[in-house]
Every structure is written in structure tokens, then in C-alpha cells.
Image (cartoon, coloured by chain):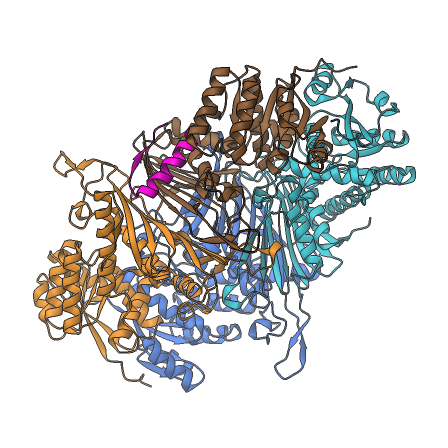
Chain colours: A brown, B cyan, C blue, D orange
Amino acid sequence: MPAAAEKPPLRIGLIGTGYMGKAHVFGYATAQRVLDLPLTPVLHTVADVTEELAAGAADTLGFSQWTLDWRTMIDDPEIDVIHVTTPNALHKEMSLAAIAAGKHVHCEKPLATSVADARAMTEAAEAAGVGTQVGFNYLCNPMMALAREMIAAGELGEVRGYRGLHCEDYMTDTEAPPNFRHEPAGGGALADIGSHALATAEYLLGPIAEVMGHCVTMIAERPDGEGGRRMMEVDDVGRAFVLFENGATGSIEGNWISTGRKMQHDFEVYGSRGALAFSQERFSELHFYSVDDAPARRGFRRIEAAPDHPPYGRFCPGAGHQLGFNDLKAIEIAGFADALAGKGPEPFNFRGGLRVQALVETIQQSSRERRWLPVVA
Amino acid sequence: MPAAAEKPPLRIGLIGTGYMGKAHVFGYATAQRVLDLPLTPVLHTVADVTEELAAGAADTLGFSQWTLDWRTMIDDPEIDVIHVTTPNALHKEMSLAAIAAGKHVHCEKPLATSVADARAMTEAAEAAGVGTQVGFNYLCNPMMALAREMIAAGELGEVRGYRGLHCEDYMTDTEAPPNFRHEPAGGGALADIGSHALATAEYLLGPIAEVMGHCVTMIAERPDGEGGRRMMEVDDVGRAFVLFENGATGSIEGNWISTGRKMQHDFEVYGSRGALAFSQERFSELHFYSVDDAPARRGFRRIEAAPDHPPYGRFCPGAGHQLGFNDLKAIEIAGFADALAGKGPEPFNFRGGLRVQALVETIQQSSRERRWLPVVA
Amino acid sequence: MPAAAEKPPLRIGLIGTGYMGKAHVFGYATAQRVLDLPLTPVLHTVADVTEELAAGAADTLGFSQWTLDWRTMIDDPEIDVIHVTTPNALHKEMSLAAIAAGKHVHCEKPLATSVADARAMTEAAEAAGVGTQVGFNYLCNPMMALAREMIAAGELGEVRGYRGLHCEDYMTDTEAPPNFRHEPAGGGALADIGSHALATAEYLLGPIAEVMGHCVTMIAERPDGEGGRRMMEVDDVGRAFVLFENGATGSIEGNWISTGRKMQHDFEVYGSRGALAFSQERFSELHFYSVDDAPARRGFRRIEAAPDHPPYGRFCPGAGHQLGFNDLKAIEIAGFADALAGKGPEPFNFRGGLRVQALVETIQQSSRERRWLPVVA
Amino acid sequence: MPAAAEKPPLRIGLIGTGYMGKAHVFGYATAQRVLDLPLTPVLHTVADVTEELAAGAADTLGFSQWTLDWRTMIDDPEIDVIHVTTPNALHKEMSLAAIAAGKHVHCEKPLATSVADARAMTEAAEAAGVGTQVGFNYLCNPMMALAREMIAAGELGEVRGYRGLHCEDYMTDTEAPPNFRHEPAGGGALADIGSHALATAEYLLGPIAEVMGHCVTMIAERPDGEGGRRMMEVDDVGRAFVLFENGATGSIEGNWISTGRKMQHDFEVYGSRGALAFSQERFSELHFYSVDDAPARRGFRRIEAAPDHPPYGRFCPGAGHQLGFNDLKAIEIAGFADALAGKGPEPFNFRGGLRVQALVETIQQSSRERRWLPVVA
């Protein structure tokens, strides 16, 4: 017999077909089957700068249409949501155009290359009443949600100390040509990946009130792509001391020259009665220490992701089978779809992206001025 | 502009809507987007035993049709491939019917509840010339492929020793009601999960020639579901010594009462010049020791899954991001689709499933007879 | 002011100055200072086969006297205890002579090269009423004691399954010349190091009732030291299935060709309510899983050695500082000294050594006869 | 036959019988037997403030004499070296007196409670020409020496980034009474244990040129021992950004309220061609990543301490057996004895202790003044 009627469609326009563009599509594919979306995603149109990219992506990813003109796509009344996965400098223009056309917008992180831009985008979206999302996918891990829940429930007691990292090695090679991530506006390790560490810190412990930054360019020059060298202005390492509003203190590091590290998005939280340790290198595990355990039996406990940790059980009924990175993207996208359908609160949105941008810029400014600064956002 | 023409369809009929049925659909969803299938999967019809299950699954999973009559579905000329994800005792009848109807068949493991049945199914499929697959998804891990490649390339030298496990704890609770896995025919820990350890052992080291088994029922009785108790005949633990044809020796354990273990599908391989250690608990890592390293610098090296280990790069361009369990299912299904489209060799098929069944039964018989037995398959 | 009077002396005669001889002296040095011995160890005489060895050891290790004639030393009335750390084949003659002279005897493991010899030594010692010890130092780890205590106290519930290993790689090299460990009488990996795995298994779970062995010579020939080759008769790998008297079942492996493994003396114990996992590679940790933890908070807990785990606190008042291998030897020796002074029960003694020898031989015989055998001891 | 003549004596006077006093004696006991000292340690006299403590320690530890008057002991011409293991505030007076009496001095860390005092002590010792040592025992780990050697040999390429920690939890409990470590002069987590992290950082990478500190009192008041509360002035957490003279940058944290951490003296070093990661929690391991490994075979390699890493082989001829914390103390003391006998360079001495004190105070001052400061020492 025929299956029940389809759910309302969510017609998608995607700008950008690089890894993140693909990851959004993978996310929808998984979310639709695994997470029981309230809307049916429809891959409507994909835009990129060459026919090869755009038509190729339409074919491979399954979009019905492709275009070289993202503005036309944004104006297409048959499209409900625009996904912006282009280089950072383009986020603002594209997002504002989409908002002006009344579309919902999912924009990859960082939301913009400056706080001013991020604020303009956030205010435009809020004024227009469209739904927004910024892609901080690490936050979509069930173990991250568990950590937040445990902290909020007081399982660690009073939270006192924090260390957060996001370190990788993709800029270790001094001969690798620079890209948009090396542009002074919006570039650098702190903005690119330190931003994840900041988002996680506030996700877990709440707002950061003050920062002292230390942003360093370790590789002074890189190839300019034309046989010469180019001086680098952006940081390879961005460190910060942070004071949380709740009284806890901590440190943050974003670093893209950490040879050997592929995904060191790690944190440790210490409270008066317990502690948590997490590494994205093994992101299906959360390590928990509690002084409530019997004295001679205490130790960090390796909790493995399980159906007890929603929405893990939607993916798999058995504990310990492990989600993958793309599954986190699916959870992210499902949260957005739920919000668009009025089934849930908006997850990490433009205002969240603005907040992270403010943290990044305040740390950068603090580093330049060599003094502590309050975070205003 | 409209995207290129679709690829030829692969019209799917699914029998069974439990976890494994869902996992197949999740696998197709991911495979289609991520792995560039040569065929376009079409979720045609799903069958189960109640309208609630069948219609619900059609709705949730996205099948166009549902039915309570799997035989009719098998005869539908619009369907190309049948997925059998029902309890083990039904695999034979359904698969044989599908083969008789000229369909390709993907059957969940174990292929059958006896070697005789598995052989009949294998021979029928081979005579009919249809494509087959049995779901040994752990083998689809890029790190498993890496291990096999390293062993074959001689990176460990002459392979001498092996330990393989598949231990979980889902039958630890003595009050949990028994299910089809406790039926004397085809049941027990060795058949249910020890079979995975056996498949992995042969995948890595080649055929096992002789076995000595030790199958033990540790929980003598379980609830019968009607307020009474029922004596258990199947093993809770199945162990074996194994002699490989290549001269290596080793041991295997399948165990479903390993309290605390969720996914201990582990192996260690020792050769004359190196060793590998792997745990499914962290299945994106392979640990490698080589005597070719400088003496004071030797150690087990934690290799993280990366684009260097295909098809990881199709999922993600960055190392260390990690695949999930459902991604392994997608790789499994993509291998099948490739084979059906003539783009690759058939992966783990009915003959492979027969082989595993023969290993399981020989170990069980060896245990009963308390003596070494050759493996005949 | 002068310190209090010395405790009564324990005058030591040591036969053999290799690593184990040294380790005994290191053990006394540490035990005397750290563990508050009831007796004052006096390094009286050391014996070895050349003046260079014996006089050198006296000098380096601090013995007052040295000799080439161990028989004379054994007869010296000024000596209280004889330590036998010579090759295995000499243990019997030396121990029996020492017992006949009324000395206490600490003999390195294995106690003897046959059960018959071990029995003769045990019965002689018991008849003479002298104190004895056999050096199973892994058992002296506070974390091993903790594991035993937890099992005995029921923290794991009913114990069901066990896996024990002792794997190293010191015989991996096929060109390494054979030594006394390759002699048919008493040699092989099972006797040399598998014996440790057996001792640990019984220490934790109690007596083993039945075994099925699988002892394999993987390296058929080795250099004979004279430019030729010599066929090997002893096992490189010794495996066993074991049935414990308490109803649990398990497996054991001793293996000296495990490339990359330096100290894989590991065990895992699974009970109805919890589990333990231990590796000698990180012997200051014990990993504990308990179903008594809250469902979404369960996981293997890494308990670090601490003053809560006696006698750790004698070495160090702070948790997590770690004992070393030689500290285990100190604990072993302190247990012996306590027993000799009547301050405690005799720790692992000749009868324990006989028991392990019986396990080893029964497994070897079982392997030869390819059948299960009861353990008689 | 009698053993060879004894080596010249090193007659020891110990002040303080707490854990560190004991650890020095344990260290001598082990060093004498294991490390072939050029001098024979003689436990001459021990001093403490009560007869119970002093006479008890003489008895337990094996000193010939005890006294309540440390000044008399220092003047005893029969004593060669004074070990100062008293609370920090007493280090200066005792060390200066010992130096004035022409004794060699081993003083526990921190050397003093101020840079001025440390400088006075250092200059007095250098003027008197006596040997000195400060107890930074973590540096005595063979794996620490290996790390330093690898960095110096360029195995990591150009060193760029560093993270160093020393975090424990012994001050987590807000109801624990304060002790001398809470005194404003010389107290706090940074001075107490952060100093270890600083010593390790400079041991590995060379001098730190500039620091930015962040020292925080998280527990504002603690019991005063008389039923009331007392405001705390010292830091519970001391963090710093650090610039090394070699161009690398990094961060340091000392923290004594890290619930669950017993010995988190950890570091990570990142260079252009490799990286190292180390944790004192598993201090017999060093993890090494090298881009010289084949691309698909790279990973952090767990190097286990072995005879390849001197002086490990003096303790044990087999790799992976593990040293203990007290063994590190033995290595420390052997280095001192070698220097006193003219057989080796002076290890971590008063000038080193002064250097660490300068780092601590500069970080504290930087934190108070909220600005970067150069390190002058």
C-alpha cells in the first residue's frame, strides 16, 4: 500500500560545494532518515562559481537544479532556506540578501569576518523573523549535551576551572599556500578553530566576562602562490585566559600548527565535587570523576555514548557503536528543521555566531593591546 | 539549470523494520550522497508483520509502499533487490524465495541457522546468478582494510599470533527474557557475535584450518516470558583455539555476558616484524608497532582514520573526524551496489556467510565432542 | 642521640647475581627503609660461578662476603635465608640443600622444572618447617590486591568470565640464541611467563579445576650457538581454556613472541554486576565497571593507585605517584620477612609454586594429548 | 671471601622527617644498590622538632643518631651533606647555616619563599664552593631526558608550541585546614606545583623570556584551625602565557583544586616536524609523532621506558617494567652524589632553584599588574 502523505517540504538552496556544502547535504540525508524530520528536505538548487562545480555538485549531491547566479537562486520563491558555505568574506552579502528575500539562512561558521558584520546580519535576521543557524557542529554531540546537563545539574559541584582547546595541524607546513583563512580580515587560527573552543566553553559554562589574549604569528611568511613570499598577519596560535560570569576561570587555545593533531577539540572542567574530560579525538566518550564514589574506588570513568544520551538512540539502539562526524552535522540540521517547523527552540543561531565573533575579536584586541578586556556582545 | 539525468534505479524491497532494517535504509541514504553510487536507490516497498510496523516504517523511512505480505513483494517485477533483516530462522525461506524470483539479496548475518541451510542458499544464489551480500559491517571499516593491506604487504613480517574478540553485555541480565538468539537452532553468543570475530580473523589472516571449541552456557535458565523459567541450551560464551592455513595460531572469543563491554570487537595480530592492535570501541584508530622504527623510538603508534584510508575521504576531507557505525553500513551497501552495477567485486556474500556458519558450527561441534576438528566449507 | 637498638638480623645468602639476584637485593634495600621490616636484612654472602661475578656482585650490591661454593655458604650457620636466583634446572638441588641445612628459602619462579621436583621441594620444606617463598612479584601489586578484594567482596557480583595474558616479545627474534628457557625440561613460554598468568588467575578467582591446552612451537629452529641450527621443542605460545572451581570459565595465554609487547600481563574479569580490566603495562591503574552506577553515567573507571590501597601509602602519601617494578619486589620480600618474624602469613610459597607447576604441566600434557584434563595438585 | 673495600662515605644529616625526608632516605637506599654510587651513603643523624619524630625516624629510617637541635648537627664535622626537607620558610636559614659550615646542601623545592632569599642562598653556596641540589625530581625521569634529547637533536624540527601543566586536587576540599603552603610568602599553587611545570618547560625548551600571569584565588576562605575562617591570599590556580628565548610560545598552569587529578604533570610540545605528549599519570611513556613516518602510517607512538633510556637499565633489564616515583628520587640523589664525587656535572642546583623562583615571582607580579613582564634572573 502507498505510504502516508509526505511531510511539508523544506526546499533548499545551497551556495558553495566544498566540503561544508557536501556535509550539509550529507547531514540532510542522514537527518531525514534517522531523525524523523518534521519537514521533507528537497534539494532544489545548488550554486557555485563554475559550471563544472555547480553542475557536478547537482549531479553528485542530488540537486534538481544548478546555477552560477546565487542571487537569482535566493530570489526563487520555490526555495525556503539558503545554506551559505562559501569563504568567510562572502557570508555577509549572501546572508543579508537571503534574509531580505525572506529566506531562512544556515551560514557556516564563522558567521562573518567582523563583529560589526555579524551584528548587522543578526539584527537583519531578527527583524525579518527568519530562522537562522550557524554551523557549530561539535556542540551537537550527545556527549557534549551530557556534559552540559551534568554541569547544570550540579554533578560537578561548583565549577571552578576550565581548559579548552581546538588544535589541528593543517597549517603546519610552511610551504602550503595561504588561503582565505590567512586574510587579515577574519582569518587566523583563533577565528577559524579557536572559535569552536570558545563556543564549547560558553555552551558548557555560560558567558565569558573578561579575556586576556595572546595571539601569535609563528610562521612569518608563506608562499604567495606566484613564486614569492608573503608576510603573514594572522595568528597561528590564539590563546586566552578567560573569566566566566559564574566565577570559574580558565584558558582557551586555538592552534593550527599542532603537528600530529587532527581534531584536538578537547576540554576539561573541574568542579568542587567532580570533573569532566573530553577529547574530540574520541568524541563518543566522556570521562567523569566524582567524589561521590567510594574513596578507594574513585577514578575517571569512561562513559561511552549510548541510547541514554539522546539523540544517540535514533542512530543506533546499542551503546558504544559510535556516531561519526557527519552524524553531528545531521543532528545540527535536524535541530534547525525542528525550529523552522516550530517543533523546538532555535539551536546555535546568528546571535550565537555574533557572540563567538565578539569573543574572537575581543581576544585579538586584548592580544594587540596586551591587556585584559571585558567581552561586550 | 536542471541537473544531469539520474543514474539507473536500484529498487529496494525491505523485509523487517527493526534496527537492522533501519540501518540498511540509513546506509543507503548516506551511501547515495557520500559514496557516489552507480545506481540510484529507490525505497520501493517495506514489509513487516503488522500494519503499524510496516506503515510506520514506510512513513518514517521513506518507502513508497508497504505490505504485510513479503511474498508478494518479492514477486513484484518493479523491485530489484530484497533486503532480509528478519529473525535468523526466516532468512532461508525469504532468501530462497527472492533468489527464485531473480532478485538480488542482501541478508543480515548470520546467513542461516545451519551450514546446510547456508549452503543451500549460497548454491541457489550462485546458480541463479543473482548478487548477494551478508551484513558483516565491521569489515567495512577503512581501518580494517588498512590492517588487511598492511598484513598482506608484509609490514608485520611473518604473521604468527592472533587474538580476536567480540564481547558485549546485552545478555548479562539473568532476568532478561530470551529471544530468537536463544533458540537452539542458530542461537548463542558464538553464532550471534562470535561470528563477527571469526569473519574478521579470516578477513585479516585468511582461512582457518582447524579449531578447538569451548562453548559454555553460564546462565542456566532465563525467564520463559510466562512467569516461569526455561532452561538455556545455547552458549553465553564461545571460545576457540584456531590454526590458520598460513601457519599462524590464535584464539577467538564471542561473549554476550561481558558486563560493561558494549562493542569489544577487538583484535591483536603479532608478526615477526610488527604488530597491530585494534578495538571497535575506538574503531577510527589502528595501533601499529614496527621493529623498523629506531630502537629507542619504538612503540605502538595510534594511526587515526584519514583520507589516506579509503573511502574515509569520501565522508570527510580532514583526518581524525571519525566515521560512525552507520557509515560502515553505508560502505557495506555501496560495495554491494557497485557489484550489482558491475563496478566492483562482490563484497562479503552468501559464500562468505556460509564460511562463517561453517566455522561457528565446527567450533560448536568441537566443543561438544571436546576435540580438535578441521574446518570443512 | 643514638637511635634505638636494631631489630634482629636476617642474614642473607644469595645464589645467582643476574637480574633477579639484583632485584632481590634492591627489594631488600627498599623494603628495609619503606616497609618497616621486623628484621634487619644483612647482606652476608653472595655466590656465583666466577670470581668476577661473585666478587663484583659483592662489591656492587653490598654483600660482606662472596664465594664460588654455594654449598659452603648454605652450611654457614651465620646465614638465615638462602635466595636462589639461578637457572631453573638448579632450583631443586640448591633449595633442597638449603632446606636440609635448616635455612629459609626464597626461590625464583618457576620453582622447579617438573611437578615431581616441585613436590619434593615443597614437602621437604614443610617437613623441615622452614619458611619459603616463590617470586611471583606481580601478585604483590596493591592494585592486584584491590582486584582480589573487590572480587571477594562481591563487587562484581557472580564472577563468570576471565581472560588472562602474559605476553612479551623477548623471543621474537629467530636469530637470538636459545638459553635455559628453551630446554625441554621446564622451558617454554607457558612455563616461563604463562605461569604468571596462571598464578594471577588463581590469585583472583581461586582454583582452576580443568584445562584444555594449546602449546605451539612457532619458531621451529634457532641458532645452536655453534654456527648451526637446533630444533626447538618448547612452546613459543601456550594457550589454555580454564574452568574455575567457582564456576567461572576463561582463557589464558603465555606468549614470548608478541612483537611490541614488553609487559602484557593483563586480565579482564566479568561478573554479573561489574567487571575489572588490568594491564601490567600501566600497573598502577585498575579499571572498574559497575552496574550500580547510574545508567547514563556508567563506564570503566580508572582507579589510580593511592594510599587507600595498602601498602602504597608506605611508599608515598600522595595518590597517583606510582610504584615501580622493583617496589613490587620490595613488597614481596617484606611479606616474606613478616612471615619469618611471625608477623604475618606466608605469602606465595613453595606450595603455591608447586600449584603453578602443576597447572603448567597439566596444560602442556593436555596440549599433547589434545584433550581436557583435570588439574591435580 | 670478604668483599672489596667500601667506597668513601657520604655522611648524611637530614632535617625534617615528613614525606620528603623519607623520600630522600628511600632514594639513597635505592640509589646505593641500583645506581652504583661513587660514595657510600651513611645515615648519620636526623633532626626534627620532637623526640617522637626524631627518634622515631632514626629508628624507622636507619639513622645512627637523632637530635632536636639541627644547628648542632650542621656543625658536626662528621657530616658531609645536609638535607633540608622542612617547611619552605625554613629553607633559607638552614641552608645558609649548612653552607657556612662547609656542608653540601640538598634543599627541597621551592628553594625559598622569595627570589631575594633564593639568590642569597645561591650566591652563598657558590662562594663557599659547596655542592647543592634542589629536588625537582620529575626531571629525573628517563622519559623526560629522552624528550629533551629528542628536542635538542631536532627530531621535532623547529619547536613552536608548548603546553605544560601541574595539576592536582589536594586543596579541593574547602574545609581542609590551610598549612604553610597557604602563607602569603612563598605559598600558592603556582609556587608549590606550578613551579614543577615551569622547571620542566625550561628543561625541555630552554629559557623563558617573557610571561603574562593569571593567578586566582578560587576558594576565598578556609578554616583557620580555631573554629573560624581565614581569608586566603594565595592562588589556587596560577596560569601563564610564556615566550621562550628560542621563539616558541606556550602556556603553563599550576592548579591544586583539579578534582580527580593526582599527578597531572603533563606537557605537549609541537614542532615543525613532530610532536611529543607526556603525562606524569603514566610517566613511563612518551608519545611521539613524526612527519617522517609514511603518510598513511603516522600517529602518536607510545614509547615505553626501556634500557634504551638510561638509567632505566640500571633498575631493570627488561623494557616496560616501569620505574616508580621513588626511583626518580633515587636518580636525583645519584646525580648529586656523582657531582659531589666529581663524577658528573651538578644536576638541578640552587641556581636552578633560583631560576624557578624568579619565574614564579615574575608570573605572580605579572598577574597582579595585569601586564606582560620579562623574566630577569
Q: Residue A302: image x %, image y %? A: 48, 40
Where on the picture, by quarter, is residue D233? Answer: top left
Q: Residue C274: image x %, image y %? A: 50, 38
Q: Residue B294: image x %, image y %? A: 54, 67
- From the viewer's perspective, is residue B154 above or below residue B232? below
Left or right relative to B17: residue B176: left
Q: Residue B158: image x %, image y %? A: 68, 64
Foreground residue, D54 or C261? Answer: C261
Where on the picture, by quarter, is residue A211? Answer: top left
Residue C37 in view, yes or no: no
- From the viewer's perspective, is residue D100 above or below residue D8? above
- From the viewer's perspective, is residue C52 above or below residue C318? below
Total of numbered circles in the picture? 0
Q: Residue at x 81, y 41 (%)?
A: B339
Foreground residue, A64 or B49? Answer: A64
Q: Residue at x 14, y 73 (%)?
A: D128
Range covered by the magenta-colored residues: A355-377
- From the viewer's perspective, is residue D70 above or below residue B95? below
Q: Residue at x 36, y 41 (%)?
A: A240
Locate the N terminus of chain C by quadrant: bottom left
Q: Residue at x 75, y 26 (%)?
A: B2
Residue C48 in view, yes or no: yes
Foreground residue, A213 or C259? Answer: A213
Foreground residue, C279 or D309? Answer: D309
Left or right relative to C358: residue B183: right
Main secondary-structure element of the magenta-colored stretch: helix
